[in-house]
Every structure is written in structure tokens, then in C-alpha cells.
Amino acid sequence: MAVETISKAAEIIKNGGLVAFPTETVYGLGADAFNPQAVARVYLAKGRPGDNPLILHIATIEQFLELADSPPPYAMTLIKACWPGPLTLIIKKKPHLPAWVGGHPNKTTQTIGIRMPSHPVAKALLQASNCPIAAPSANKSGRPSPTTTSHVIDDFAATGELDMILDGENSDIGIESTVVDMTGAYPVILRPGSITAETIWEVTGLKSGTSTAADTSPPRSPGMKYRHYAPKAPMQILKGEPHNIAAYILKQCTENPSKEHQVGVLVTDSVNNILSGKIPQNVEMMILGNNNNDIAQNLFAHLRRFDKLNVKIIYTEAVLDTGIGIAIMDRMLKAAEGNVFEV
């Protein structure tokens, strides 16, 4: 990306503006983390609840040390192994920092979420801005996260809330960063991502705990408390053998074959092959992917396509909840509001 473009975006950040930019996970909606008016604009633009915290994006370890209060040794071990990359650390923040930094300007936070993205456009923007950038995902709250520039445009073009969008093509990973609480004696995963508990164990020798929204109030991490990642249509997650999943979908679709009731189906090749030639015309079929990495990269894009097709219900096949599959199922469950059917 041209230096002039990055410089223009950095000036917007410095002057209190909002810039959407790509990261290796999803697109972020960025503002100067220490400008309360700019941060308030982020919450307003997204329609984000005030107690939902933000993640601060940084360019250097020095910036991390300026924000974090006495990070434990295992945090520094993870940083050396995983930064830059899709890992957010929740840490106690320095006492001298404004009480609101890391969240809404009208709230207070005891901890702060920090990450160092690896995407070249994000890195260039952070370096040129020379300040931590507070950046949740660049979508309206509750919607599937954006993995392309077009997704950001879909959510914000009509309202004019953004001052600039940096185009970085598709996000490589496609789901948000792993969030790990570092405030205790051992790491606690607050939001699963592509960096798994196995990776944390391999790097630190520590077994990770897990946490839910009920464990902290207000939540320490995004993605814990509120409805997230959801398409417009209700969604059902189907667990079972491919033939059983195919039979269930076929039954549901043939019971209401009218074109006025469009159905979205998101399944693996195995289930798709069983359904081939059998489904009615009112069904929009999409393939999850050949492996969990592909599924993670494409999940939100598929859900957004279903929105554009105006489907009335979505049936999606569950994935194995191992490795990054844990993070995929976390997003699916939130998108479906917990609607899982064993078939």
C-alpha cells in the first residue's frame, strides 16, 4: 500500500477520526486509544454496548510495557512466541493510565486488552500513527465480523461514520484473535481463536483455563457477553453423521419448498454430495471448506452472503471442536444463539 495512503490514514487517527483497516484476523475499526471523543465515536458508529471493552493494537513491545502493569513472565514468553500475531493479552494496566482507557470513555476498566497484529497494512498504520489504536471489528455490533473491505462498506457506507477504509484484501485467518487473561497465576482463555490452548501449553508449559461472561462483570474481553457474529436469519447447527444431517436438511427444505421461503445451507462436501440433485430450488447451498482453516477464513463471508440472499433460515453443519475448531464452534454457537440439534 502506498506510503501516502498510510500517512493520510495516520493523520486521520491523530486528529480523532475513524479508520477501518485490515488485520490478519478481521477488519478493525480504529481510533486513537487515548482520545476519548474518538473512542466514543467508535462505540456510537458500531452501536456497541458501553461495557463491552476494546482491544488496543500496538506496534512495539515498548508500547506494551508502557501500558501493562507488571506482566507475568509467562506473558512475556507468549509475546516472544506469538507476536506479531492473532493473540490478545488481558493484563492489569498501569495505575497512571486514565481509568477509561481500554473501554468506553464513560466507564472504568481495571484491565486492558492488547495485541500486536501481523498484517502489513495494520503494522504500517500503527507505526505511522505512533499511538495505540483501539479497534474492535469494523462491523455493526452483533453482525458477522468483516473479512473484506466490501463487508465494511456494507455496514457503514450508507451512514458515513468512517473517515477512511484501508483495503487489505481478504483477512488470512477470518476469525478474531485468541484472548487470554494474564492477570492470574496461569493463562485463562476468554475467547478462543487460532492460537489454541495446545499452543499456549507448548510455549509456556502452562495449562490454560477457560472463562465465561458470568465470571467477570463487566466482561474483560469482547465476544463474551453480547450477541455476536449473527446473520439476519435464525440459524441451526446440526451435529451428527453426514447422512443424518443430509436427511434432516432435506426433510426441512421439502416441507416448505416455496421460493418465498429461501433456505441457506452451509455444509461440508460430504453432506453436499449426499444432497446433490435432491434439494428444491428454494435452497442456497454453500460449502464450509476443506479443512478447519478454510472454514474459519470463510465462515463470516458465508453468513453475510446469506444475508444478501435474504434467506429465512440457515442450517449449518457443526465442525469438530478441536484446535481452531473450538473457535469456529464458539462463533457458530453465538451466531445461532445456542441452537444445536443432534440428528
Image (cartoon, grey):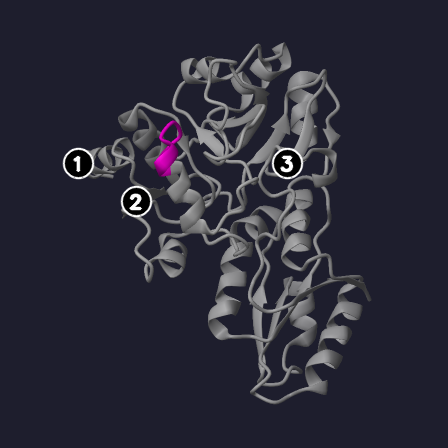
Lower position in the chain sequence, tag 1 or tag 2: 1
Task: Decide: is 18 above or below 252.
Answer: above
Circle 1 packing at 10 Å, graded few (<14), some (14-19), many (20+), is few
- Which marked residue is nearer to the observer: mark 3 or mark 1? 3
- The amino acid type found where label 2 is placed reads Leu
Question: In the rendered image, which residue does mark 1 sit on?
Answer: 4
Q: Residue at x 66, y 25 (%)?
A: 200
> Which residue of the protein is positioned furthest toward the bottom in this rendering?
258
Question: In the rendered image, which residue does mark 3 sit on?
Answer: 219
Can you give x and y, in whole percent of width and height, for residue 223 in the image? Answer: 60, 43
Residue 138 seen in the figure: no
Circle 2 packing at 10 Å, graded few (<14), some (14-19), many (20+), is some
158 drawn magenta: no
Question: In the rendered image, which residue does mark 2 sit on?
Answer: 166
- Left or right of 137? Residue 41 is left
Q: Are marks 1 and 2 in contact (CB under 8 Å)?
A: no
Can you give x and y, in whole percent of width and height, for residue 281 in the image? Answer: 58, 85
Q: Determine the CA span between mark 1 and mark 2.
A: 12 Å
Q: Where, by quadrant of the figure, is residue 342 drawn?
A: bottom right
